[in-house]
Image (cartoon, rainbow, N blue to C red):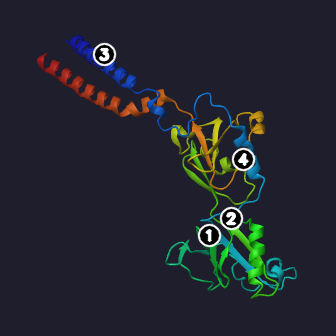
Amino acid sequence: MQQTALYRLLRLWLLCVPFAVLFSSCVTGKYYRQNIMFSTPTGEGVDTMKLRTLVGRTSRNYIIQPNDYLDVRVYTNKGERILDPNGELQFGSPGGVSGATGGVTNRVGQSSVGSRNVGGANRGNQGGQAPSTSEFLVQATGFVNLPMVNMVKVSGLTLLEADSLLKTKYDVFYKDSYVATRVTNNRIIVLGAPGGQVIPMYNDNMNLIEVIASAGGLEGGGLGGGGGIGGGRGRAYNIRLIRGDLRNPQVQVIDLSTIEGMRRANLQVEPNDVVYIEPVRRPFFEALTDAGSVFGLIGGVAGLLTTYILVRDLINK
């Protein structure tokens, strides 16, 4: 009688195996590649003209564009307060200069209300707290509304040209003014294996390797445990740098798996570039992971049936 129960159990498992195989066969590699982004047509050649354009653009200084946020700081006496060579100006903080921590940023011109605090409430410079700074929005017309000088057209200018222009404006109010302008909302978008991240551009000569390092590397900051798809593992030989108008972008496929590939690539990045690191897909193991709950359910049902058969045979015995 016990052999009969084991035979029934074996037959039950043999019935479950084809069902599991059928389920696994329905899950194809194509299904697990549905979240692969920015695929290029097979056999498509590299547009060398676009690559030359990429190199030419990165050789220039950044051009101020509409919707940029500008951090404009104005100093007197040719910016003596910045250097303070004699150590005589250490009291307080100069207007428009942020402390190391605790500063508050006001974004002016973002809406009809006029400004928005970024990072907390505007408390000013009370009790030794870091002073607040303001970021001014470049409107779609290319003009920015600045204190005292009102509307100034800065779109199409480099930061150095904007500094010179604003210096002439503020010289009317201050003696030997010194102006330092900085764009605060430049960023690089990283997608793929490291997960979706937005990397701020802290300097104009940032390169692709620095961007990948800021995103946590090809594995998203953990050995096989990144936050991206595919377990966080990225293909070093298939990194796409997407630039320009997204309706007609310039795409460069970069191979960082070899030194030669790194030499041939243009690694300089620009604001608003999209870096896509194609993740390594393992359809079989991913299918097993997804099917784990189904196998668990089948095992639970089989266990209940096995218990029922054994109990029934013991009772009949």
Q: Which residue is mark 2?
A: 64
Q: Image height check: is 75 above or below 195?
A: below
Which of discs 3 and 1 lies nearer the camera? The answer is 1
Please tell me which of labels 2 and 1 falls first in the chain.
Answer: 2
Q: Which residue is mark 1?
A: 138
Label 2 and label 1: CA atoms lie apart by 8 Å
Label 4 and label 2: CA atoms lie apart by 18 Å
* Residue 105 position within the rendered picture, expressed as x and y whole percent measured from the top left: 60, 74
**Could you tell me if the residues under marks 2 and 1 are in contact, i.e. CB atoms within 8 Å?**
yes
Quick one: label 3, few (<14), some, or many (20+) residues within 10 Å? few
Label 3 and label 1: CA atoms lie apart by 70 Å
Residue at figure coordinates x 30%, y 31% from the top left: 297
Q: Which residue is mark 4?
A: 54
Label 4 and label 3: CA atoms lie apart by 60 Å
Which element carries disc 3, helix, strand or loop?
Answer: helix
Quick one: label 4, few (<14), some, or many (20+) residues within 10 Å? many
Residue at figure coordinates x 68%, y 35% from the top left: 46
Label 3 and label 2: CA atoms lie apart by 69 Å
Q: Amino acid at mark 1?
A: Val
Which element carries disc 1, helix, strand or loop?
Answer: loop
Quick one: label 1, few (<14), some, or many (20+) residues within 10 Å? many
Which element carries disc 4, helix, strand or loop?
Answer: helix
Please tell me which of labels 1 and 4 falls first in the chain.
Answer: 4
Q: Which residue is mark 3?
A: 14
Q: Quadrant of the C terminus?
A: top left
Q: Amino acid at mark 2?
A: Ile
Q: Amino acid at mark 3?
A: Leu
* Residue 126 position within the rendered picture, expressed as x and y whole percent measured from the top left: 61, 86
